[in-house]
Image (tube, rainbow, N blue to C red):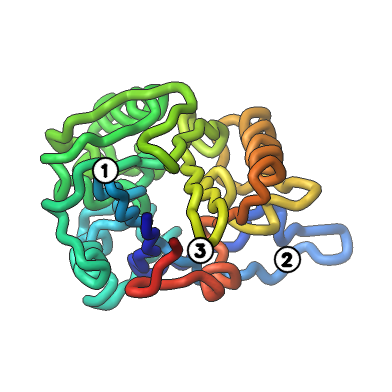
Amino acid sequence: MRVYVLNNGYLECDSNQLVAFDTCATARDHNPVHNWITIPVYAVLIHHPDAAILFDTGCHPEAMNGRWPDSLAMLFPYTFKEEHRLENQLRLAGCKPSDVGIVVQSHLHMDHAGNLDLFTHADVYVHKAEFEHGQRLVHQNPNPATHGGYIKADLDVPCRFQLVDRDFELVPGVEVITLPGHTPGVLGLILNLKKEGTLIFPMDALYQRANYGPPARMPGIVYDSVQFFASVEKVRRLAGKHNARVMFSHDMAFFETMKMTPEFYE
């Protein structure tokens, strides 16, 4: 089994989006300087003897050309080079979209589900509560500014959705775990590798090392704070059990230490 990290470009945002109260006004400083930061967007390709598995599909290349509402594009401007397009990153790993038989969506926000239209032939695993929540938001109101991080065009694709709500083994060596809190239903992966041990990809259940702690710190974007903290502790327990490395989703300092395609973990 080989695991490739696919660089899908970068978002910019206020650091308070990722770590709540990263900057905060006080009696001594009524107008603190906020931190505008750059964070990575990535997907994960797993070359497994049983299947080619893709974990998340990143941002759509037309995100800033009207696909995202202006309100979202101003909060999280997206930039990428041609090499960061998902198809090109897959090619670096010796794969093309039609080779992917299984997609696991951590959740359905715009920076994780933007290229599902490339995988209408695949089985797409997504948390049942997440699927229902996202679809309800994008279809209840025609105004895209009310859809939060969900983009209607991302979700209106004829994929073979497989709705799940429990932990399970997807294929030998690949476990899917439920980590709700950031949204109603986040899915993470545990990858048990022969040479490099166990990797846990919690995606946005853990944006950054600062969220992990200890103590855990809540992000600025959270659906259920109680579930968020429970999911962080679940990851901590599993990391201890497997002596695993936790792979944070939007941590630039950590991202710069990761192996990037065409390099791989095995």
The residue labelled by disc 2 is 31
Q: Quadrant of the C terminus?
A: bottom left
Q: Is residue 129 visible?
A: yes
Looking at the image, do the residues carrying marks 1 and 3 touch, with CB atoms under 8 Å apart? no
The quarter holding residue 163 reads top left
Residue that mark 1 sits on: 50
Badge 1 marks a residue whose secondary structure is loop
Marking on residue 233: none
Q: Earlier in the sequence, mark 1 or mark 2?
A: 2
Going by the numbered disc 2, the residue's amino acid type is Asn
Q: Nearer the viewer, residue 139 or 237?
A: 237
Q: Disc 2 and disc 3: Cα gap in Å? A: 18 Å
Measured Cα–Cα span from mark 1 to mark 2? 55 Å
Q: What is the three-letter code of the residue carrying label 1?
A: Asp
What mark, if any, has residue 13 been given in the picture? Answer: 3
Give the left or right position of residue 90, taking residue 176 as reference: left
